[in-house]
Each structure stands twice: as C-alpha cells, then as structure tokens.
Image (cartoon, grey):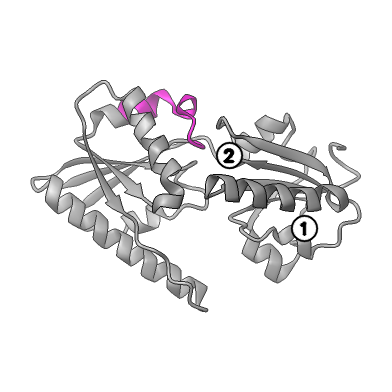
Amino acid sequence: MITLNLIGIGTGNPDHLTFAAVKAMNAADLILLPRKGGEKSDLIDLRRAICAQLLTNPVQIAEFDMPQRAGQHDYVGAVLDWHDAIATLWTEQIARHLPNGGTLALLVWGDPSLYDSSLRIAGRLPDTQVQVIPGITSVQALTAAHGICLNDLAEPVLITTGRRLREQGWPDGADSIVVMLDGDCAFQTLPTDGIDIWWGAYLAMPQEALMHGPLATAGPEIIQSRATLRKEHGWIMDIYLLRRRGRGEQP
C-alpha cells in the first residue's frame, strides 16, 4: 500500500509551508520532484531549496522528467492523455523506489484543490491512499501582495481561466473575477471601460512583480512587462483579479 501525501507549497516561498506540510515532508519515505526542462529549471530549484531548508530527517528524494502536453485541438483530450502519462511515470517511480510500499510525498504548487491536477492523477494510481495537506494559493498571495479584499462586501467572486475568459467573455453573475492559467493575457478581449485589474507574477518570490490600475491603461503595461519577465526568466507564473468599478476598491 502506498500513502500519497499531496503537499501544498504555496508559490515557492518556504515561508508559505505550514507546520503540517513540513511534518508531512519529514514523515515521507520518498519525495518526488518533477523536472520541466531547462527553461523552467527555477521551478525544480525552488523545490530542491524547500527540501534542503525544511527536511530534518533523511528522506529519499528522486527526480523525474515531466512529459510534455500535446498541443492538439482537443484541449480536454490532450490534458487527459497528459494525466495518463504522468500517472504512468509516478507508478514507475513508486515501483522503483518503494517496491514494498510506504509514504510518497509530492510538493504541489499552490494548493492541490485549485486548478491543479495532482488529485485527478492520483486517482489513477492503484492501491493508493491519498492525503492532502493544504497550501497557500496564488489567489491569496495576490490579494495579500496588493493589500486588497478578494470580494466586495456581500458579493461573489468567480475563479476562471484565461482560456474561458477568452472564449466566453466576462462571466455572468460576478463583478469580480480571478483569472488563472492565462498565457495570452485574455483580458485583451474585454471592453476596458469601468474595469480595474490587480496583477501579480512570481508572487512571494524575490522577482515578484505587481501592477494595478484601470484595465485601459494598466493592461498594455502588464502585457509588455509580462513579455519582458518571461524572456528574462524563461518562464512566468502570474494571476490577476478583474473588478467592475463602482462597488469595490479603486486603483
């Protein structure tokens, strides 16, 4: 039997990890770290640094190369195929390093429950008991960095993706929306009048970048800054909050 601990690690800052997360890391028999190619070497370096700083027990650490997701037209099908490939890799690593069972830990960016597929992939593993240790999400890191409330008073917030915003426009029933997984600045597709944006990249990291203001003026600046940062670092993780003006914070 394998116990799989999915440990939320926030946005890469070791200070984001809870006591429960540190305890789970040190109780593991094996920690698996994914490599995502040379351009994203910072991501595994951060996980290595977290292990070096927070592990006090002699836990075995193994690294593996993440498969690339196919860029096929069928987005959902491509993602499901990708999940199958990752599950196969996890199974191979378990057979190699934990042939008699034990506790495996995976360090999950943000929190395993929010726009992360680790729980879905874990469901493909046979004879595995899954436990989740929650982490700070990029949503929380964004609002903390800007010092703002996520929601207006007694009003809802909708969390969506750049792909959904681009294809379907502003969602009905919400004046505040958080947009994640947006590689193409989908806010460009929206009418800009009366909308404010709070944007953040590399949240809680030394290279953190923040911008906010009316979408009409801040939007083009964010697009330019994002392209520059991506070129400089080889990768970028960002998130933003859009809010229709009139009820909440003003820029």
Front residue of 50 and 170: 50
Residue at 49%, 30% (x, y): give it.
13
Is any atom of residue 159 visible in this view?
A: yes
Q: Residue furthest bottom?
A: 73
Q: Separation of disc 2 and disc 1 at Cα?
A: 30 Å
Q: Residue 191 at what x, y percent from top left?
A: 86, 62
Classify mark 2: residues with Cα within 10 Å, few (<14), some (14-19) or many (20+). Answer: many
Three-letter amino acid code of the residue under disc 2: Tyr
- Give the left or right position of residue 208, taking residue 115 as reference: right
> Is residue 21 one of those drawn in magenta?
yes
Residue 30 drawn above or below residue 34:
above
Q: Quadrant of residue 25?
A: top left
Is any atom of residue 108 visible in this view?
A: no
Q: Residue furthest front?
A: 232
Q: Quadrant of the C terminus?
A: top right
Classify mark 1: residues with Cα within 10 Å, few (<14), some (14-19) or many (20+). Answer: few
Residue at 67%, 31% (x, y): give it.
145
Three-letter amino acid code of the residue under disc 1: Gly
Front residue of 189 and 143: 189
Q: Secondary structure at mark 1?
A: loop
Front residue of 34 and 129: 34
Q: Quadrant of residue 164?
A: bottom right
Residue 30 drawn above or below residue 183:
above
Q: Residue 134 at what x, y percent from top left?
A: 45, 37
- What residue is disc 1 on? 173
Report the number of discs.
2
For the magenta stretch, what is the residue range?
10-24
- Give the left or right position of residue 195, taking residue 109 as reference: right
- What residue is disc 2 on? 202
Q: Earlier in the sequence, mark 2 or mark 1?
A: 1
Residue 90 drawn above or below residue 202:
below
Q: Residue furthest left?
A: 100
